[in-house]
Image (cartoon, grey):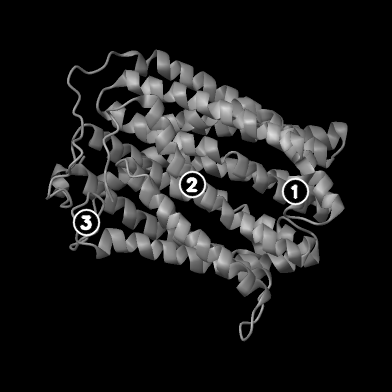
Amino acid sequence: MAARNLSVGPVPKLVATLALPVLGTFVLQSLYALADLYFVGRLGAAALAGLGISLNTFYLILAVGQSIGTGGLALMAQAYGRGEHARVPGTFQVMFWLSAMVGLAFAVGGFLATETFIRAFTQDPEVYREGVAFFRVYSGTFFVQVLLISLSFAFRAVGDFIVPTLMMAVSVLLNVALDPLLIFGLGPIPGMGVAGAALATLLAQSVGLACYLWLVIGTRRSTLLVIRRPFFWDWRIAGNILRIGLPAALQFVLFTVSLLISFRYLRPLGGDATAAASVGFRIFQSALLPGVAIGAAVSSLVGQNYGAGLFSRVRSAMLWGILYTAIVFCLEYGLILAQPAFWVSLFAQDPGVVAVGAQYLVIMGLAMPIYGIYFIATFSFQGLGRTIAPLAGSAVRLVVIVGGMQALVYGFGLTAAGVFWVGLAAMVLEAATMGGALLILRRSVLARPDAPAPGAAPRELPPDAARPMPAAEQT
C-alpha cells in the first residue's frame, strides 16, 4: 500500500486517473450481482424475482458501510491533507472496529428476519420460497460487506486507489468460478440452486476480506492503515465518524426505501414485472458506475485539498467531475437506446420480462445526462464532511416516489411503465436539488482564497506513522 498526496498535480488528470481503478472496483462489485443474475436466470423467473428482492438489501448494507466509511474518509483525508499523519492510524482503527461490530449486528438481524422480509415483497409462493433460500445465506455477507466498504474508503482517504481494486478482483473471480459450481453442482458437489449463488458470494467476499486483514494486521510494513496490539479505541473519534457518517447512512436508507416502495407497487403486476425491474435495475446500476467512480475520486481530492486549504483545487475537482460524468453517461445512454432488449436478454429469456426490462432501461436512462450532478455533489459533500445536503436530495426522491405512486394508483392506473416514469421524475428532481446545494457551497464555503502555505502531505511516510497517537491527543 502506498499513500498519495493529492494536493499537487493537474486536477483533470488526477480525477481521470484516480477514477479508473475506482471504476474497476465498482465494475467488479457489480459483477457479483450480474453473475448471480446470469446463472440464477437459468433457474426461472421465480428464482430471478426472489434474487432481485434479496439483492435490494445491498443498498441498506451500503448505507451502513457508507455511514462509517464516509466519516472515516473525511477525517483521514483532511488530516492527511494538513500533514497531520499521526492522526490517521488511530482514526482508522476506530473505523475498523466500529465496522466489525455494526456489520455483525446486521448479519444476525438479517438472518432472523429472513421470512418476514421476503414475505413483504411478494405474494407468489414460488418467489417466496426462492427468496428465503437465497436470503438466509446471503444475510451472512452483511458482516463482510460492511468491513469491505469501510476498508475501501480508508484506503482511498490516503490516496491509495489500487488496493481496493485488487481485493475486489480476487473476490469477483472466485464468485464467478463458484456460482455455476454451487448453483448447478458438479461431480460430488450437489447443486444448491439459488442458495448456491448466495454461498458463492459469501465465500468469495470472505476471501477478499481475508486479504485486507493480512494487509492491515498480518504485515509489518510501515503504513498509516494498520491494526496493532494493544487495540486502539477512542469514543470521540467514533462520535466524529458517526456525526459525519450517519446522514450519509440515512441517505442510502432513504434510497433503499424508495427502491423497495417501487418494487412493492410492482407486486400486484406479477412476478414477470418484478423480475423485469430487477434485471433492468441491475443493468442501469452498472451503467451508473462510472459516475460513482468519478465521484469517489473527487471525494478524496476534495477531502485532502480542503484539509490543505486549496479551495481552488476543490472547485476544479467538482467541475471536472461533472464534465466527465456528463460525457460518459450520454455515451452510455446512446448504447442503451441502440439495443435495450439485447441488454436485458443477456440475463432473462422470458419475452415478457425482456420487453418490460427494455422499457425500464429506456425510461430511466433519460435521467443520465444530468444525473452526474447528483454523484459529484454527493461525493464532494462527503469529502468535506458535510453530509446533510445529500440527505436532503434523497428525501426529495422519496417524497416524489411516494406521491407519484399514489397518483398512479388513484389517478392514472398502476402500470409498470407508470412506475418507471415516477422513478425518472424522482431522479431528475434529486439531481436538481443536489445541483442547487453545490452552487450554494461553491459561492460560500469554497469562495475563500487558497491558504498561502498549505500543509502538503509528503509522498514518503515517516517510519513511525503506524503508531496511533494517545487518546488525549486525538481530535
Measure the alpha-carbon separation of dots 1 and 2. 22 Å
Q: Nearer the viewer, residue 369 or 45?
A: 369
Quarter of image, res 211? bottom left
The residue lying toward the viewer, choosing from 185 and 386, is 185
Give the percent coordinates (x, y) of residue 73.
34, 41
Residue 202 location (% of width, % of height): 52, 66
Can residue 430 be seen at all in this image of the molecule?
no
Residue at the (64%, 84%) spot, across then down: 187
Q: Seen in the image, is 126 located left or right of residue 105? A: right
67 in relation to 297, above or below? below
> In the image, what residue type sits under mark 2?
Gly
How many numbered callouts? 3
Question: Residue reaching furthest bottom?
Answer: 188
Classify 67 as above or below 133. Answer: above
Q: Is residue 225 above or below residue 71?
A: below
Q: Quadrant of the C terminus?
A: top left
Badge 1 marks a residue whose secondary structure is: helix
| Nearer to me, 450 or 458 | 458
* Residue labelled with disc 3: 232
Q: Which mark is residue 24?
A: 2
Q: Position of residue 71 (x, y in %)?
A: 36, 41
Which residue in the protein does label 1 denote? 344
For badge 1, the amino acid type reads: Val
Callout 1 crowding tier (Cα within 10 Å): few <14, some 14–19, many ≥20: many
Q: Secondary structure at mark 3?
A: loop
Looking at marks 1 and 2 on the same chain, the residue that comes earlier in the sequence is marked by: 2
Q: Amino acid at mark 3?
A: Phe
Q: Residue at coordinates 81% horizontally, 36% vertically from top-left?
A: 418
- Residue at image coords 46%, 55%: 168
Query: Picture quarter containing residue 312?
Result: top left
